[in-house]
């Protein structure tokens, strides 16, 4: 099992540019989660999907953030336009079902300059 | 009361020591709990699940006290490699598999 796969591992971009983060969950997992982690705010849940359907996006900071899950094996988190305060590590996680915990990807370290 | 509260630490202990972390939660309907470990600049990784009164795995023991709404993690015979941040994780009732992560407790084990 390859685990949760995220790409890219690192992204450096200029303010105002569009950024797309990608995630491939573990096959068979029916829930997918996007988190952001910073030193100041810790681990924040941005949005999560159940069976490819967005369930709760209340953690998405503002309209500049959007997420999609077109099928069970792929999800994207897009930031447009990016700002320096978006700099953080973005994690994707997937889960088999209620009670099983989450498996996290290695994260994407985003730096917006 | 916050949904999940942990002492941020750091806990600085010598090798071989026993250390315990506590975590309190506010959602009394929670059924399954977890402890995750996160190393610096790495992703959180599942350490232990706690479904009933407790769970033991080698040097690690997790206990659940539903009446007082706290879970604990006990590490015996600490190793240098145990140095990490330990995250307490609590489910939110209402289905859809939503977990709330605590801010974490930092542990530093020194020689």
Image (cartoon, rainbow, N blue to C red):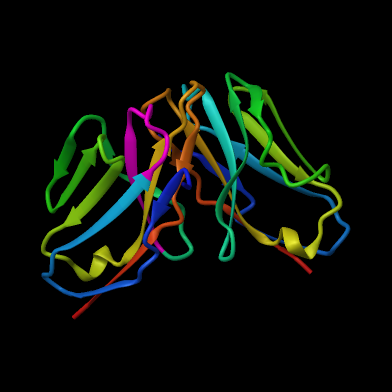
Q: Is residue A110 visible?
A: no
Residue B90: % across, % down = 40, 38
Residue A12: % across, % down = 73, 64
- Look at 68% across and 34% down and name the residue there: A57
Is residue A39 magenta-colored? no
- Look at 44% across and 65% down and name the residue there: B40
Q: Quadrant of the C terminus of chain B?
A: bottom left
Q: Nearer the viewer, residue A75 or B75?
A: B75
Q: Is residue B23 visible?
A: yes
Answer above or below: position of B43 versus B110. Answer: above
Which residue range is magenta in the image? B25-39
Q: How many marks?
A: 0
Residue B102: % across, % down = 44, 50
Answer above or below: position of B45 versus B97. Answer: below
Q: Nearer the viewer, residue B29 or A99?
A: B29
Residue B65: % across, % down = 23, 39
- Look at 43% across and 25% down and name the residue there: A96
Name the side, left or right, on which A68 lies relative to B49. right
Is residue B28 magenta-colored? yes
Name the side, left or right, on which A98 lies relative to A57. left
Answer above or below: position of A24 versus B29. Answer: below
- What is the residue that sits farthest to the bottom in this orientation? B111
- Look at 48% across and 47% down and name the residue there: B2
């Amino acid at each position: 099992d390859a685990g949760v796969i995220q790409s890219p591992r690192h992204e450096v971009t200029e303010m105002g540019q569009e950024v797309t983060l990608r995630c491939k969950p573990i096959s068979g997992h029916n829930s997918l989660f996007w988190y952001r982690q910073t030193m100041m705010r810790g681990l924040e849940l941005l949005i999560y999907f159940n069976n490819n359907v967005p369930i709760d996006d209340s953690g998405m900071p503002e309209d500049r953030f959007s997420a999609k899950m077109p099928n069970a094996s792929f999800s994207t988190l897009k930031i447009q336009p990016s700002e320096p305060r978006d700099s953080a590590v973005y994690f994707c996680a997937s889960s088999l079902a209620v009670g099983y915990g989450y498996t996290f990807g290695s994260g994407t370290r985003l730096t917006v300059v | 009361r916050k949904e999940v509260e942990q002492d941020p630490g750091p806990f600085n202990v010598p090798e071989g020591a026993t250390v315990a972390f506590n975590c309190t939660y506010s959602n009394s309907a929670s059924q399954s709990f977890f402890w995750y470990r996160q190393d610096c600049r790495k992703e959180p990784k599942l350490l232990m699940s706690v479904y009933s009164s407790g769970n033991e795995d080698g040097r690690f023991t997790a206990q659940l006290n539903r009446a007082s709404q706290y879970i604990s993690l006990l590490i015996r015979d600490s190793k240098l490699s145990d140095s990490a941040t330990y995250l307490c994780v609590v489910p939110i009732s209402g289905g859809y598999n939503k977990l709330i992560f605590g801010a974490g407790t930092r542990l530093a084990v020194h020689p």
